Amino acid sequence: IAKAGGLNNWAYVKGARLVRQMNAEERARLQSTVKILNSAKDSINVANIDMSSSYTVGIDLQTAISNPGSDADLILRAGDNLIIPEYISTVKISGNVMYPNTVTYNDDMTVSDYVTQAGGYGFRSKKSKAYVVYMNGTVAKARKLSKNVVEPGCEIVIPQKREKKANLANILSISTTAASLAT
């Protein structure tokens, strides 16, 4: 940052993120993990794994600048892109809400207040599994009444419960059990 002339007045240091290119070792580790997941009968959906050649590293640039040489001060590699965005005074609410929306940031509001500005929770929303994605690439769990979790430029995501499908086997087993109990 010093070699680039420092930060300007519009830099939002809390939103800084590092986009790193995978090296050969990381690519091989990812491919072996995918191979293991393909062979295993697990609940992880392999199709959802990001197979691109780059990934985001969640960083704390404020700590790195104030404490040079600390663990927060990452060593850059060839091909790394350090992205420092401008301050964004909005919060995006997405997922299973009535009307996904982007609203103005207010430090007095809770997660539940932001969801209310998106029309409230959807019918099948997993309220206890809500999370916040920050501009720097990190993620945190979002409790309904917490204020300190939401920051400018972040996104609140409300996941959706899986739809339970009544298949023929379940219906037959329930009806057979009911008939047995009735007799």
Image (tube, rainbow, N blue to C red):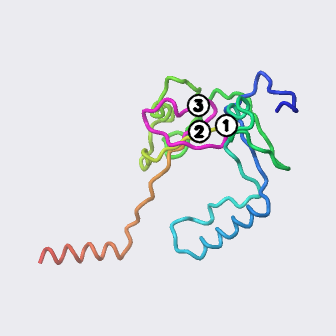
Q: Quadrant of the C terminus?
A: bottom left
Callout 1 amino acid = Asp
Alpha carbon distance from label 2 to label 3: 9 Å
Discs 2, 3 touching: Cβ within 8 Å:
no
Q: In the figure, 102 relative to 48: above or below?
A: above
What's drawn in magenta, residue-wise? 135-156
At mark 3, the secondary structure is loop
Which residue is denoted by mark 2 in the rendering? 155
Judging by the rendered image, the residue that carries numbered circle 3 is 151
Badge 3 vs badge 1, beta-carbon distance below 8 Å? no
Going from N to C along the chain, the mark reached first, 1 or 2, is 1
Of discs 3 and 1, which sits in the foreground? 1
Taking 100 as reference, is 171 left or right?
left
Q: Between residues 156 and 57, which one lies in front from this camera angle? A: 57
Q: Amino acid at mark 3?
A: Glu
> In screen coordinates, is 160 left or right of 6?
left
Provide residue 111's location: percent of width, then percent of height: 48, 34
Mark closest to the chain's N terminus, 3 or 1: 1
* Label 1, label 2: how far apart the Cα atoms are: 18 Å
Residue at x-position 62% and y-position 30%: 152
Measuring 35% from the left and 76% from the top, which residue is drawn there?
169
Magenta stretch secondary structure, dominant? loop
Q: Residue 143: give x, y in percent of width and height.
A: 45, 38
Which residue is the extreme one toward the left? 183
Decide which of 154, 104 is in the foreground and name it.
Answer: 154
Q: Amino acid at mark 2?
A: Glu
Queried whether the magenta region covers residue 181, the answer comes back as: no
Residue 15 screen position, x and y as percent: 68, 34
Q: Would you name the residue on which mark 1 appears? A: 60
Residue in the image at 26% along x and 72% along y: 174
Of helix, strand and loop, which one carries label 1?
Answer: loop
Question: Is label 2 in a helix, a strand or a loop?
Answer: strand
